[in-house]
Structures are given as C-alpha cells and as structure tokens.
Image (tube, coloured by chain):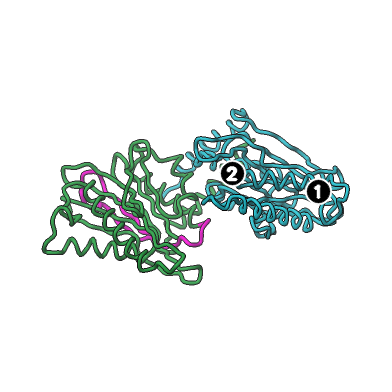
Chain colours: A green, B cyan
Amino acid sequence: MTYCVGLKLNAGLVLLSDTRTNAGLDNIACYRKMYFFEEPGERVVVVMTAGSLSVTQTTLARLDEAITDEMADETTSIMLAPTMLQVATIIGDTLSRTRREIIEQCRDLTQQASASMIVAGQRKGGDMRMFLIYPEGNFIEATEDTPFLQIGEHKYGKPILDRVVTPATSLADAQKAVLLSMDSTLRSNLSVGMPLDLAIIEKDACAITARRRILDGDADFMRMSAAWSAALRESFVKVTI
Amino acid sequence: MTYCVGLKLNAGLVLLSDTRTNAGLDNIACYRKMYFFEEPGERVVVVMTAGSLSVTQTTLARLDEAITDEMADETTSIMLAPTMLQVATIIGDTLSRTRREIIEQCRDLTQQASASMIVAGQRKGGDMRMFLIYPEGNFIEATEDTPFLQIGEHKYGKPILDRVVTPATSLADAQKAVLLSMDSTLRSNLSVGMPLDLAIIEKDACAITARRRILDGDADFMRMSAAWSAALRESFVKVTI
C-alpha cells in the first residue's frame, strides 16, 4: 500500500508521501512515489502516485518522454501545457491509456492493475491547483471546502486532517498536520512505511520551496511522534465522560 | 456501513455499536446491531453485527429460534452450549449457512450478501472470551496482545485504540476509548451514525453490568466529543516539528 496526502492552502501546497511498496506481505521494497517537474519561477508540478508500480512507473516514464520528445507541444508535454487543468488532463489520459494496456497484458490474472495520482502545482500567472486523478483518468480538484486530497491507505490519517486543516492553516502547521496524519497511518498499517518524502511549494513561487526526505529513525520525526502520543494520552486522561 | 468495537480487558468486556444501515446513500435507516442473550449470574452473550441486514437478522432470528426450540440442546442453543467456544461455533455455523442460502437466492445480483459478527461473553465457571466471526463462519479471538476487535468501518477509529487500550485499561477508561474511537468514525464517515449502543460486562458477573443507548444530541457525548476536539487541537499546537 501507500499513503500520500496533499494540502492546498492559501499560503501554498504541502505534499507528503511514504515510499513502501509491496507485492503480498513477503515482497516489500522502497520506491519513491513523489515526482518533481520544475522550471523554477515559471512552473512547478508535483505528482504523487498510489497503486500498481508497473502502472505508475510506466505512466511517469511516458510523461517524461513526452517532455523531452522533439515533437513535444502544449497538448502532450506537462512542461508546455498552458494551464494546470491541461497538466491534469495530460496526466489523466496517460494514466488511463497505460492502465488499459497493462490490464490487457494481465488479462489472465484475477488481480487488476490500477493506480491513482495526486497532481499539484502552479504555472506563472495561474493559480495553485491540486487534483486527484482516478485510475480511469478523470479527476477531482481540492477546493476551499475540501483543502486536502489523499490516495492509498487514507482512512487512519483522515481524522486529524478533518480536525485541524483549513485553507488558512499556515505552512508550518500544515507540515505538522500531514506528518501526524502519516504517523497515525504508519502505526496502524504495516504496508505504509518510512522513509517519507515531504515537499512544500509556497504560493506564487512556482518552484519547490522545500524538499526533504525523512529517513527511518529521523530524530525530529521520532520526537514529534512521541510528543504527539504523549499529548494524546494526556488529552485522553483529561477528557471525561 | 457500521462500526462495532469490543474490548476484552482484565476488568471486563466493553462493547459499542452504531445503528445506521444504508442501502445506497438514499436509503438510510436505524437498526440495532447489538443483541443480548442473558441468564444473569449464569451466562451472558452479546452479539454485534456488521454487513447485510438480511443476513444478520436471519442469523439472529435462527439463533433465537434454536434457543426456544423444544429440541434445543448444547449443540444448537447458545444458552445451553457448555463453553463460549461452542457459542462462537454455533453462531459461526448459523451465519455461514444463512449467508450461503442468501447468496444462492441473490445469485443474479452482482452485490454479494455478507456479514461478520463480534461475539463476547462469559459462562459461570468459564473465562470471558470475545470472538470476531467471519462471513464464512470461522473466527479469531481477542488476546492479551490484541485486546480489541472491530467490525465494519474500522480504520478511522483504530489509531486511538492502538494508543490507549491495553488489557489493564479500566472499564471507565475503556468506555471513553470506545466512545472516542466511535467519535472519530462518525466524523469521517457518514454511513456510521447515532444513536449508539454501549454495554459493559464486568468480569465474573455473567450478566450485563451496564447498558446504555446514547441518542443523537446526548449532552454527555457531545461534551466529551467537543472536549476531545479541543484537546486534540491544543495538543496539535503544543507538538513541534
């Protein structure tokens, strides 16, 4: 499994993904699930992926190929697309086509190849936007009312987001919120695992403002996780029924 | 959907269920999902159900019928079965048979009829035991290491249980833990809804010690829910990354 979460706030975009992939329980590996496309100051696009690795890797490879192709134009390259909506459409179409081809190859298997993605970014002169792209290539967008999107194992980490995230949340608080959301998921589901990839994109920077890989045993993350556990237990003692 | 949770602690059993059932999103109803079988001082069995209402209601009706049947014996009646293990076996067999029959009736539908149950109780002279019965009739049991079992929409409410529940948890704290676990689920999933049914069975009482229906708008529950939200937000502010 996977857990990726993205927040679209007034102050910017905050994105977090884990890196664990598994085929069954006895074949566990570490793969990056966060991909960057950046022309600093002009355009930044971050893609996070969940689902069959063969689908997500092939989709990303095709997006890369389309960018470097000498015939690349605004309908094929996410680095030339005029709007974030067009970026999401190109990624959705590529995902949908790749998935259909792989399903066709795997038609003798009972397990379906599938994948979904979160695409977030901004183009100079445009607004920040964030989309969740479904396996079929269609998508939904984060809004004022629903400023976060999740893919993969999303349920364990949703209660904390429901409680603390609004569009007005600061980037520092947002970073804390996604890390605590991930922390709850890591504790409750073995198939989501460290290290983590965190990215922050400030509004109108059109570039990655901060990017960090949080390794297993990271002192700050462990301290935060322990402090949160302690705070939760304290809160539990204080609340009465 | 449904959310039911049971804790098996050194001090006793604590059980909580919601009451919402839905067929699609436009047909929502309220049904009890917690059933009591009791001969105070001798035997107490509580069953909580999740899944297709036709499967769970028919299974419970058959268990009732088997109890009142004049041919009832220790292999058919959960009120005569000599052990909690035998109680779980009778319920598992009844569930499995009922489910197979209903699947056969519904074979033209794509949706599968299915259900699972939590069975908890004690017989005089025996130990408290708690089982999770799968749709196929097989079951697992709560242990020292895993003192809680959940059925239905279990993920949202698991992080709090993972953090605070151990076999040594007091019955008062356990009550708080299951209510907070339910509170997180209610907030994050519309298909789980009030009112709630709560039951407490003290160790060796072999009877229901306390039983309470918590209605929508219950002042105590709302106060606890608000206090927990406030405490979580306070904790969130205190924790630093």
Residue A224 rendering spot, x and y as whole percentages: 46, 52
Q: Is residue A159 above or below residue A194?
A: above
Residue marked by disc 1: B66
Q: Chain of mark 2?
A: B
Instruction: Check disc 1 and give the amino acid type.
Output: Ala
Q: Residue at x 66, y 53 (%)?
A: B101
- The residue drawn where x is 58% and y is 31% is B222
Towards the viewer: B240 or B199: B199
Q: Residue at x 42, y 65 (%)?
A: A21
In the image, which is nearer the foreground, mark 1 or mark 2?
A: 1
Q: Chain of mark 1?
A: B
Q: Residue at x 25, y 44 (%)?
A: A128
In-image side of A111 versus B43 (left or right):
left
In this picture, which residue range is highlighted in magenta? Answer: A187-214
Q: Report helix, strand or loop for mark 1.
A: helix
Graded by Cα atoms within 10 Å as few (under 14), some (14 to 19) or many (20 or more), the crowding at tag 1 reads some
Other residues around mark 2 within 10 Å, as few (<14) / some (14–19) / many (≥20): many
Q: Quadrant of residue B205?
A: top right
Residue A188 is a magenta residue:
yes
Measure the alpha-carbon separation of dots 1 and 2. 26 Å
Residue A102: assigned label: none
Q: Nearer the viewer, residue B71 or A73?
A: B71
User: Sequence order check: which comes first, mark 1 or mark 2?
Assistant: 2
Residue A163 placed where, x, y %? 46, 39
Q: Position of residue B76 (x, y in %)?
A: 81, 54
As drawn, the label of residue B2 is 2
Query: Depth check: B201 or B70 in front?
Result: B70
Circles 1 and 2: CB distance less than 8 Å? no
- Left or right side of A94 for B73: right
Q: How many marks?
A: 2
